[in-house]
Image: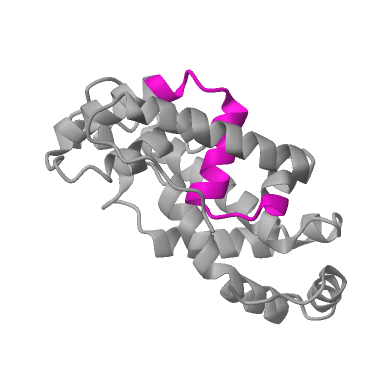
Amino acid sequence: MEELPSQKQIIAELKSDREQALAKYFSALRSRLEKVVRFRLDYRLKGRVSESDILQETYVRAAQRLDSFLQKPSMPIFVWLRLETQQHLLDVYRKHFDASKRDVRKEISFTRPAHGNAGDTSMALAAHLVAQMTSVSQLIEKSAKIAALEDTLNEMSELDREVIALRHFEELSNIETAEVLGIEPSAASKRYLRALKRLREILEMLPGFQSPESPM
């Protein structure tokens, strides 16, 4: 992971040379933002929406909203860009799953109607955990398993699901996770370990799943 300069230096560069500085830091953080998109992008939209397009449009969005970031100089630039990425994903979700645009739902057979959104962590967790099952090859079978696991994951608290998503799948640091969730780093660390234990207990009751390991 590329080491970024101090927050003070980043803010100073963005104020003095907006376009060039934003392009530099977005490029430096692109691989990390790709992990966010890969995890958060609704699995039913893959093949219709490219990760590169999401990131390009997020960059445009960030450039337009740079002043809002500069008004919050204590927020790490990655946390801000991740937030802008997630907001754009929400816009994409609304566009494709709007009631007046049913083409996505017609093209893919679902076991039940779509009901979440781009911030639906349970669905994202379920989709990625199901993807680890080598025996699943058909989309309809995978969709059924995702729906079933999603229901089970909803038994966890929203904060526990989110801390698993941030630490394990998006690979945020504990400090970044705490910043995103608005809690103290010590609380984020304790919650992650507790949530990971709970997730393992859930997966052990389901055949074919592998329990996730803590990131290094």
Q: Does residue 169 show up magenta in the picture?
A: yes
Q: Residue at x 68, y 42 (%)?
A: 189
Q: Give the percent coordinates (x, y) of residue 38.
A: 41, 54
181 left or right of 199? Answer: right
Visible residue check, residue 117: no
Q: Residue at x 22, y 35 (%)?
A: 208
Q: Give the percent coordinates (x, y) of residue 147.
A: 30, 25
- In the image, residue 65 sits, relative to residue 2, either above or below, namely above
Residue range highlighted in magenta:
152-176
Identify the coloring: one colour
- In the image, residue 196 sits, relative to residue 27, either above or below, namely above
Asked where in the image residue 195 lies, by quadrant, the reply is top right
Q: Give the percent coordinates (x, y) of residue 81.
A: 64, 58
Q: Residue at x 87, y 71 (%)?
A: 8
User: Which quadrant of the rendered structure holds the C terminus?
Assistant: bottom right
Asked where in the image residue 137 lies, by quadrant, the reply is top left
Q: Give the percent coordinates (x, y) of residue 52.
A: 41, 65
Q: Nearer the viewer, residue 26 or 49?
A: 26
132 left or right of 117? Answer: left
User: Which quadrant of the rendered structure holds the N terminus?
Assistant: bottom right
Visible residue check, residue 19: yes
- In the image, residue 6 sits, relative to residue 116, either above or below, namely below
214 left or right of 81? Answer: left
Q: Nearer the viewer, residue 164 or 66?
A: 164
Q: Residue at x 29, y 30 (%)?
A: 146
Q: Main structural element of the magenta stretch: helix, strand or loop?
A: helix
Tell how many labels.
0
Q: Does residue 168 show up magenta in the picture?
A: yes
166 left or right of 6? Answer: left
